[in-house]
Image: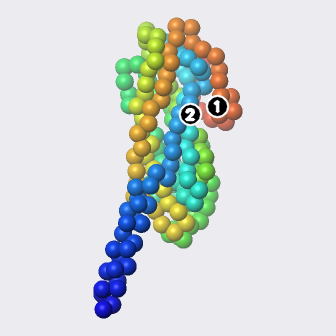
Amino acid sequence: MLITAVLAVSFALAPAVLAQENEQVVEVKSALARDAVRPGETFKAAVILKVQAGYHINDNAPLDEFMFPTSVSIDDGPEFEVVEIYYPPGRRARYSYSEAELVVYDGEAVLGVLLKAKDGLAPGAKTLKAVLSYQACDNTSCLPPKELAFEIAVPVAKTGGADIHPEIFGKLRFKFSQK
């Protein structure tokens, strides 16, 4: 009788756990610092993460070696070169599932990507394919690691464009010095 009750509870909880694992806990969107880029120009892109309330993700350099780091990868192609990826410092916090202090992103986090458009790049709309890798956790447990594909739209113009989104890009601190 006890085994039947345990199995019944297990089967009742299974859809909830599966639904939680399939839930999209992180949304990602991108923005450029200019409304168009010039061939040969180094420019900034932002990867804006929105983490669902009640969840957090590890920053890029977790203090605990067993935690899954958040990372962005961008497909290298013939049109653009990735110069640098900037990860802001996370917030220090403690959770019941870890004895160690963790460094996490929650709410909104903005990652930065410094890119260089190749010389001779033809004007027009271009697209960079990218992937965000992360592991979302709540206060008591973690979901399996996920990869979320997204795109960065890059308009290319012979003369470049005007600066936009200073509220986003003024906070990104790249190590590479732009010319």
Q: Point out the image quarter for the N terminus.
A: bottom left
What's the residue type where badge 2 is placed?
Answer: Ala
Which of the two residues, 100 or 12, is positioned nearer the viewer here? 12
> Disc 2 or 1, which lies upstream in sequence?
2
Is disc 1 placed on a helix, strand or loop? Answer: helix
Q: Which mark is residue 46?
A: 2
Q: Are marks 2 and 1 in contact (CB under 8 Å)?
A: yes
Residue on which the image places disc 1 = 169
**Residue in the image at 49% along x and 22% along y:** 154
Please state if 9 lies on the left or on the right of 35 as rendered. Answer: left
Residue 161 visible from this viewpoint: yes
- Mark 1 packing: few (<14 Cα in 10 Å), some, or many (20+)? some
SS class, disc 2: strand
Coordinates of residue 168 in the picture (x, y in percent): 65, 34
Q: Name the residue: 34% across, 85% down.
A: 5
| Frontmost residue, 59 versus 24 | 24
